């Protein structure tokens, strides 16, 4: 008797649960078929969020009534450009999301029926989930709708935030995928919250790509070209420094790829190609560029020159090696141009020669004064202007011009002869240095100018 009552009670509970599930299923079906107005997003929350992202142009996709639309847009339009679009199929999504600024904000009300169609139309229009579009998806659900978001082609540079609305606050989650095309998993990270009292609190202060740099061993396809046939497997040929003069740039760039692998923790699938890629007359491309367009290659492990015809096919990252033409202007140093006459002899030699000239002038002046003292002819002196006469003798001796003055004393003759012998030796060294400087290549300063 007891067993029977328990069985009847359990069966009644199952019938109740079954009826509840049927009611919930009917409500979900009706919600997908019939447009249901949703509560609008708090305008102040929208302004605070996009102000932190430095976005001043916003597009809203929702199913609000006219009164809510007017109240929301009037509050937003004070500081930001805004456009409202009712959720429906076959929207011209590319024209709607055309922006004049660097980035555009997109507000999506997930609680509206057919909200998933906006995401599908965005992907169908071949628009990318990158930094150009800052998404803010708002819902009253208790958790992030990962089933829907996991089907989106999100990337590591995706700006997609889901806000869970709870009474007077919004709980924010950052959503991204390292690579949907490579089978990456959806990442949902708690970002922070917003309420009217505290405003926006963002706990993800770390640099975005530093936080997402671990790719968890994801397989990425690289391609390179070689001008010489490897004598071993390609990995060994590019990493072992044997015959480093062969395929130098290919080895250099593959080393950069290995460095990136260690930083971002991905696996390399290297492919050998024949050419970098050129545009054919029919508009297609071959080589590495063609493989990128087909999706079989993710990045190039060799260098690429910037060419206009492939700018719409590839995305250049950073310059890795600089090659440019140079013009060389060769000219002497400024100091050599200022001292052409003094250049054959060193500066110390010239100062020593000046000191010797002063010493010889003093000796000749004393000798001349003594000669005038002993050979005075009445009131007339033999050398009436002895200082100037001896200076002329010094200049004449240094310039190899001789002199008409003839000293009579032995001391004066010895000083005179020594002066002319010293000046002759100095003149010979000066002349020899000039001839040697003309025969030897001059020192030059090299300055290059890039073109």
Image: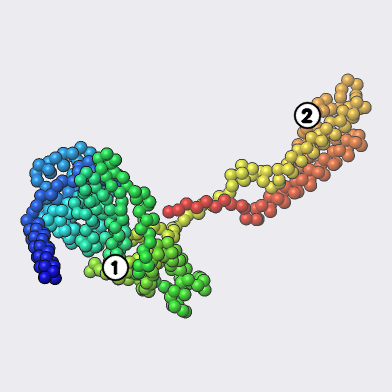
Q: Could you tell me which secondary element the residue under label 1 belongs to?
A: loop
Q: Is residue 392 left or right of residue 291?
A: right
User: Foreground mark, 1 or 2?
Assistant: 1
Q: Which of the 4 image quarters holds residue 220?
A: bottom left
What is the x, y in percent for residue 165?
Answer: 21, 49
The residue lying at 41 percent from left, 73 percent from top is 226
Task: Give the number of callouts.
Answer: 2
Q: Do residues under tags 1 and 2 come within 8 Å of each other at their CB atoms? A: no
What is the x, y in percent for residue 273?
Answer: 36, 73
Q: Which residue is mark 1?
A: 183
The residue lying at 17 percent from left, 54 percent from top is 110
Q: Is residue 108 something one can see in this rendering?
A: no
Q: Which residue is mark 2?
A: 388
Most foreground residue, 316 or 379: 316
Most foreground residue, 146 or 446: 146
The residue lying at 88 percent from left, 38 percent from top is 413
Q: Could you tell me which secondary element the residue under label 2 belongs to?
A: helix
């Amino acid at each position: 008797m007891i067993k029977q009552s328990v069985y009847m009670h359990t069966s009644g509970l199952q019938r109740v649960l079954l009826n509840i599930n049927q009611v919930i299923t009917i409500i979900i079906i009706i919600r997908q078929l019939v447009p249901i107005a949703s509560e609008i997003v708090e305008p102040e929350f929208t302004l605070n969020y996009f102000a932190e992202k430095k976005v001043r142009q916003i597009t809203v996709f929702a199913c609000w009534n006219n009164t809510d639309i007017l109240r929301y847009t009037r509050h937003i339009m004070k500081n930001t450009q805004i456009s409202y679009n009712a959720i429906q199929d076959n929207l011209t999504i590319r024209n709607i999301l055309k922006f004049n600024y660097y980035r555009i904000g997109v507000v999506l009300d997930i609680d509206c029926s057919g909200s998933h169609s906006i995401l599908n139309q965005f992907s169908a229009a071949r628009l990318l989930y990158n930094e150009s579009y800052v998404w803010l998806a708002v819902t009253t659900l208790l958790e992030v709708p990962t089933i829907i978001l996991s089907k989106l082609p999100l990337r590591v540079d995706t700006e997609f935030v889901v806000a869970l609305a709870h009474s007077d606050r919004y709980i924010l989650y950052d959503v991204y995928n390292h690579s949907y095309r490579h089978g990456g998993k959806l990442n949902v990270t708690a970002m922070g919250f917003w309420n009217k009292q505290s405003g926006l609190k963002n706990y993800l202060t770390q640099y975005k790509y530093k936080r997402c740099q671990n790719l968890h061993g994801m397989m990425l396809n690289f391609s390179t070209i070689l001008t010489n046939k490897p004598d071993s497997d390609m990995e060994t040929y590019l990493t072992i420094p044997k015959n480093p003069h062969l395929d130098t740039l290919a080895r250099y760039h593959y080393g950069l790829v290995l460095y990136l692998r260690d930083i971002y923790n991905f696996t390399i699938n290297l492919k050998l190609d024949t050419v970098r890629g050129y545009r054919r007359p029919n508009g297609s491309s071959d080589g590495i560029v063609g493989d990128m367009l087909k999706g079989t290659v993710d990045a190039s492990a060799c260098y690429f020159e910037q060419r206009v015809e492939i700018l719409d096919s590839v995305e250049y990252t950073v310059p890795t090696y600089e090659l440019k033409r140079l013009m060389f202007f060769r000219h002497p140093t400024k100091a050599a141009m200022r001292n052409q006459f003094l250049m054959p002899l060193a500066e110390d030699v010239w100062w020593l020669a000046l000191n010797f000239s002063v010493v010889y002038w003093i000796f000749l002046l004393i000798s001349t004064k003594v000669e005038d003292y002993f050979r005075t002819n009445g009131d007339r002196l033999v050398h009436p202007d002895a200082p100037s006469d001896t200076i002329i003798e010094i200049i004449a001796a240094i310039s190899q011009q001789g002199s008409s003055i003839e000293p009579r004393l032995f001391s004066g003759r010895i000083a005179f002869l020594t002066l002319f012998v010293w000046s002759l030796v100095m003149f010979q060294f000066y002349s020899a240095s000039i001839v040697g400087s003309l025969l030897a290549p001059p020192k030059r300063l090299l300055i290059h100018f890039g073109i």
